[in-house]
Image: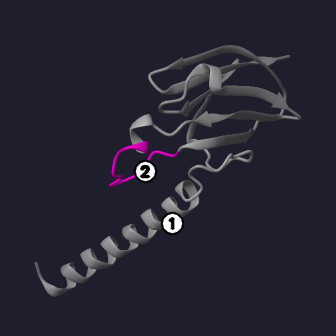
């Protein structure tokens, strides 16, 4: 590896370490607090057809009973709680990358009216299908 490649690699590693530290600070230094406001936002994929809008949300480890879904003033709101794994209480933590605690994702919907046609939580992914109303 030449000097220029080594420098680029070291810079990339340093940037990644800083990004990981910032994620940890935002998401995990509040462990044990009773969280009433969201501390993380789940990632989403959104697909639109002429008749429907489909939203797929990554929610690993979240059970359906901990989910709240609603539409308010043209905004889809997905909220809930991902509890810390029980193992975390007794184990030494080497890495925490999967967010935990209260979450909320607000998604501005396109113009028009929608109704929730289908809601499905499978393999850690919540799929919502919103039917377009005419």
Question: Farthest residue toward the bottom?
Answer: 3
Which colouring convention does the figure follow? Answer: one colour
Q: Residue at x 44, y 22 (%)?
A: 123
Percent x, y of residue 128: 64, 22
Question: Farthest residue toward the top?
Answer: 117
Distance in Å between CA atoms under marks 2 and 1: 11 Å
Magenta span: chief secondary structure: loop
State which quarter of the image contains the N terminus.
Answer: bottom left
Q: Residue at x 53, y 55 (%)?
A: 28
- Other residues around mark 1 within 10 Å, as few (<14) / some (14–19) / many (≥20): few
Question: Farthest residue toward the left?
Answer: 1
Residue 97 located within the stretch drawn in magenta: yes
Instruction: Name the residue tied to disc 1.
Output: 22
Percent x, y of residue 102: 65, 42
The magenta segment: 89-99
Question: Farthest residue toward the front?
Answer: 90
Nearer to the camera, 34 or 63: 34
N-terminal of the pair, mark 2 or mark 1, is: 1
- Other residues around mark 2 within 10 Å, as few (<14) / some (14–19) / many (≥20): few
Task: Report helix, strand or loop for mark 1.
Answer: helix
Instruction: Name the residue tied to disc 2.
Output: 97
Vertical relation: 95 (above or below) 82: below
State which quarter of the image contains the C terminus.
Answer: top right
Q: Residue at x 43, y 43 (%)?
A: 89
Residue 45 tag number:
none
- Please indicate whether residue 26 sits to the left or right of residue 16 in the image: right
Nearer to the camera, 62 or 54: 62
Label 2 close to label 1 by CB (< 8 Å) = no
Residue 60 located within the stretch drawn in magenta: no
Q: Residue at x 73, y 41 (%)?
A: 106
């Amino acid at each position: 590896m030449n000097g220029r490649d080594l420098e680029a690699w070291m810079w990339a590693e340093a940037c990644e370490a800083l990004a990981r530290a910032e994620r940890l600070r935002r998401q995990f230094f509040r462990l044990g607090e009773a969280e009433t406001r969201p501390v993380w936002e789940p990632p989403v994929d959104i697909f639109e057809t002429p008749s429907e809008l489909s939203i797929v949300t990554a929610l690993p480890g979240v059970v359906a009973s901990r989910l709240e879904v609603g539409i308010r003033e043209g905004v889809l709101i997905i909220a809930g709680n991902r509890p810390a794994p029980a193992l975390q209480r007794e184990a030494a933590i080497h890495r925490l990358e999967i967010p935990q605690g209260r979450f909320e994702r607000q998604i501005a919907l396109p113009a028009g009216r929608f109704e929730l046609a289908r809601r499905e939580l499978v393999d850690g992914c919540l799929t919502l299908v919103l039917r377009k109303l005419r």
